[in-house]
Amino acid sequence: MTPWWKHGVIYQIYPRSFADASGDGVGDLPGILAHVDYIERLGVDAVWLNPIYPSPMRDMGYDVADFTGVDPRFGTLEDLDALVDALHRRHIRLILDFVPNHSSDRHPWFEASRRESGGPMGRHYIWRGSRAHAPSGDLTSIFGGSAWSLDPERGQYYLHSFLAEQPDLNWEEPEVVRAMQEAMATWFRRGVDGFRVDAVTALAKDTYLLDDGTRPEAADLREFLHTAPRSPLMHRVLRSLRAVADTFGDRVLVGETWVNRIADLAAFYGDGDELQLPMNFALMEAEPTAAAWRTVVDETESALGEGRWPCYFLENHDIPRLPARVPDPELLRVVAVLLLTLRGTPIVYYGQELGLWSPPVPPEAQQDPVGRDGTRFGRDGARMPMPWTDAPGGGFSGAAPWLEIPPGYLRHAVSVQERRDDSLLALYRALIALRRSRPSLTEGAYREVAAGGALAYERLAPRERTWVMVNPEARPMRIPGPGGEILLATRPGVLARDGEIWRLEGRSAAIVDVR
Ligand code: GLC
């Protein structure tokens, strides 16, 4: 039987920004619970939540102070259980974020580790050098600045791939492996269906690379990440997590696997004993042209082959939303068709189905530590509160929200789009429903079919053939191919038959049953 995560569409929710039930301006678990009907109507199979763990929130929850708790800002463990129940009753799975690379500097493990180098937690983090001697190799962290910070208490430097408040865990220490496996198991026992594993490539800090400062690839951790596919340590970590998932059956591990070369993605699947769904960043990074999409899909298909299942997405909480790259509303409809009809599991980011964009956030209002010092692009724009209604405040919260809802968002609110058959939300719902109803789209093979400036492909199941034609260009395209019934189009009338040829209008896409 095909596992659920192959059929499924995953919906990513940024909990701070989905809905606030407690009235403090910050989204929470009861807020999500209040909107499970919306999630069900969207037709998705799973929800992935960004971190909800207790955290000082220096990196918005990616600085975890307790891997098995819920931060009071988001609710309680009981709220989490209630959400799992409500989703499961609707046959929707829940995926949490798992952050294996680092903890918060307020985590009790780090507090113990900095106190006592010879204590039981002395090796839980990556300590080097001494007060007088900085560690060899001048490593730059992914968020900028040195990746080594001196801890005055222990008199040694610790490694942090991200903020100084996010010390990296030492996965060479068996006790860390055991404790993190146990944390994961705790959530599985609570009914959680899987994890999105954070910053997978940052795990590749095999000591031989760390301690040899002469290696040029070690100068900047961002470069270092690209060595991950070849890192024995990273593969060990992934296998240890997958082993836990497998003891619970039917659970999934998605991974944040940002690599330069698509071919490198294959490594994260291991021998079927690491991640089931390493995320492919290439589609998100591609220009919106048929040529760029074709390259990404061809390379992915040939790198992964039939045995490994792709995982595509176009937006997430770390990058500007789609309109920054796809400025035309008609094109947003075209990329929706693309994302939801390729072979693989698609992830849709909350608000993507509404066509939200990333507004500029003035430096004094920035909440993201990455944006605040002005040296890098802040991520707040991609994390705005969800507009549910077009009333002031967007129905997100009874209080002032943690980030101000851009006034333009209200025109895109759920309540507004639900009133219109031609809204982007209606298109996402129709696409997801169609995908669900057709085995060729959910699990069929992929084959590109010859076509000029448009991208056209066929999805094939034993008794079903579906053609997908996407045309991101402004001009119409002529695509030779078999006739059939039009199942869905980005707008009525954009696809027409002309003898043996399909004529597809500019900036449009369509799906045809050619059985
Ligand atoms: C991942 C997360 C990002 C976070 C970082 C550090 O890249 O997606 O939001 O800041 O890891 O945990």
Image: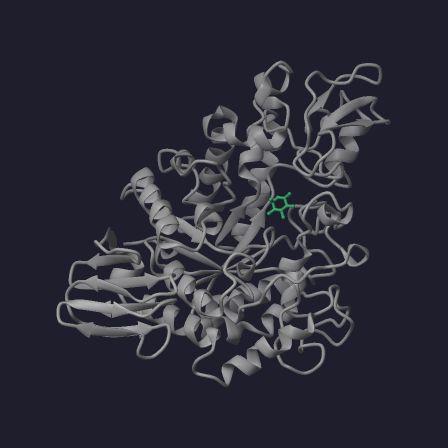
Front-most of residues 401 and 168: 401
226 to 301, vertically: above or below: above
Location of residue 15 (image quadrant): bottom right
Front-most of residues 321 and 116: 321
Q: Quadrant of ligand 1?
A: top right
User: Going 42% across and 52% down the picture, which residue do you hit?
Assistant: 312
Whether residue 103 is visible: yes
Front-most of residues 353 and 73: 353
Of all residues shown, which one is farthest toward the bottom?
A: 419
Of all residues shown, which one is farthest toward the right?
A: 152
395 to 141, vertically: above or below: below
Quadrant showing the C terminus: bottom left
Percent x, y of residue 179: 61, 36
The mark tally for this picture is 0
Of all residues shown, which one is farthest toward the front?
A: 475
Location of residue 486 (image quadrant): bottom left
Percent x, y of residue 306: 27, 44
Front-most of residues 504 and 118: 504
378 to 139, vertically: above or below: below
Whether residue 514 is visible: no
User: Going 63% across and 52% down the picture, which residue do you hit?
Assistant: 51
Quadrant showing the N terminus: bottom left
User: Going 34% across and 60% down the picture, which residue do you hit?
Assistant: 341
152 to 11, vertically: above or below: above
Percent x, y of residue 339: 40, 59
Percent x, y of residue 440: 25, 61
